[in-house]
């Protein structure tokens, strides 16, 4: 009977009306009303206890959706996660002013230190969601950390929900004091052009975009590449062409640097542990990055 309850719950959730403008209370009331109006769907032979169990599961579903997009909950999770390292320091939170994901800024002793957001499967501004955790995106952050081309990034588990994960990136100018966004750079010097090839290689091999396409998402620290935001493409057919990425910035592809980048990316993938991942997610991530390693090997022949 347990599997029957689960399947009927999923069916009701899929049909349940939701709107991004509704409050949590309004959403739950609408959900309960929907359940009552569609009671026939539960089947005549179901006991009152079984019906109550389904109603409880659906209400929990709506509650978790709202908890996962609550900035108050997000701030509490961040305080708990960083508690030991921030002992005795003044911690406040500011608004996240850019991007579509729900988030906040952790301000320590008056200085913004961590930029926190939900992962790409999490809630977006004004829209509650409990989308699946994108472990490929999470692991891509870990690989970029290994390569040292992005600010220090940590993954904060959802302490109050089973579905939420937060991505916390350190203030770029803490890790990279001389950082300058690409949009502020009027001309590229020789070292920057080499780093642009490196960036194009990383984007292609790791199947990430929204870097070259958004000149606010990358830049340089004393001529050294820094990537601080991106989007992951899950289909290998969506792998960006490094030559085309560079054309938009009128930079020629340097094959030697591309080969060096492939070697570096391969080593980073192989040296970034998968132990933190659940077993089912590990298989998914391994498959994705196995393809990336094959692409690296193609450049290294």
Image (tube, rainbow, N blue to C red):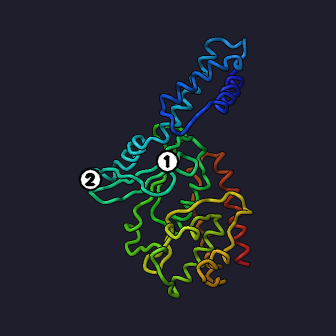
Q: Residues within 10 Å of mark 2 (few under 14, many from 20)?
A: few
Residue ID at (39%, 45%): 75
For the point 46% across and 37% down, which residue is it? Answer: 160
Residue 242 in the image: state x and y as whole percent: 66, 75
Q: Nearer the viewer, residue 89 or 129?
A: 129
* Secondary structure type for disc 2: loop
The quarter in which the N terminus is drawn is top right
Residue 193: give x, y in percent of width and height: 55, 83
Q: Find residue 291 and report its horizontal and vertical position in percent.
A: 71, 63
**Relative depth, front residue between 108 and 147:** 108
Q: Is residue 46 left or right of residue 174?
A: right
Where disc 1 sits, the SS reads loop
Q: Residue at x 58, y 77 (%)?
A: 198
Label 1 neighbourhood size at 10 Å, few (<14), some (14-19), many (20+)?
A: some
Relative depth, front residue between 173 and 184: 184
Q: Against 208, is 17 above or below?
A: above
Q: Is residue 16 visible?
A: yes
Total numbered circles: 2
Query: Would residue 178 be found to the left or right of residue 62 on screen?
Result: left
Quarter location, residue 73: top left
Q: Quadrant of residue 241?
A: bottom right
Mark 1 vs mark 2, CA separation in Å: 29 Å
Q: Residue 40: x, y in percent?
A: 71, 17
Q: Which residue is mark 1?
A: 125
Q: Residue furthest front?
A: 21
Identify the mark nearer the N-term, 1 or 2.
2
In this rendering, the answer to whether 195 lies above or below 160 is: below
Mark seen at residue 89: 2
Taking 65 as reference, is 222 above or below it?
below
């Amino acid at each position: 009977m347990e599997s029957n309850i689960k399947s009927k719950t999923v069916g009701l959730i899929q049909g349940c009306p939701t709107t991004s403008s509704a409050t949590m209370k309004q959403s739950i009331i609408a959900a309960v009303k929907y359940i009552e109006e569609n009671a026939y769907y539960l089947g005549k032979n179901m006991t009152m206890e079984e019906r109550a169990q389904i109603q409880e599961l659906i209400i929990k579903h709506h509650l978790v959706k709202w908890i996962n997009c609550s900035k108050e909950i997000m701030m509490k999770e961040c305080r708990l996660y960083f508690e030991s390292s921030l002992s005795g320091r003044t911690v406040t939170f500011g608004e996240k002013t850019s991007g579509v994901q729900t988030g906040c800024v952790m301000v320590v002793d008056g200085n913004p230190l961590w930029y926190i957001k939900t992962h790409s499967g999490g809630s977006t501004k004004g829209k509650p969601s409990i989308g699946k955790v994108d472990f490929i995106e999470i692991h891509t952050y870990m690989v970029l950390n290994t390569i040292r081309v992005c600010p220090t990034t940590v993954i904060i588990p959802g302490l109050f929900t089973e579905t939420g994960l937060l991505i916390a990136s350190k203030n770029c100018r803490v890790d990279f004091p001389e950082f300058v966004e690409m949009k502020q750079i009027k001309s590229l010097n020789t070292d920057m052009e080499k780093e642009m090839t490196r960036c194009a290689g990383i984007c292609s091999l790791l199947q990430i975009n929204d870097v070259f396409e958004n000149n606010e998402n990358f830049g340089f620290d004393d001529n050294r590449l820094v990537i601080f935001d991106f989007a992951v493409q899950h289909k290998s057919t969506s792998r960006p062409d490094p030559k085309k990425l560079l054309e938009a910035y009128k930079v020629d592809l340097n094959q030697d640097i591309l080969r060096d980048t492939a070697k570096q990316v391969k080593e980073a993938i192989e040296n970034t542990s998968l132990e933190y991942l659940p077993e089912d997610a590990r298989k998914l991530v391994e498959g994705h990055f196995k393809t990336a390693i094959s692409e690296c090997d193609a450049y290294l022949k």
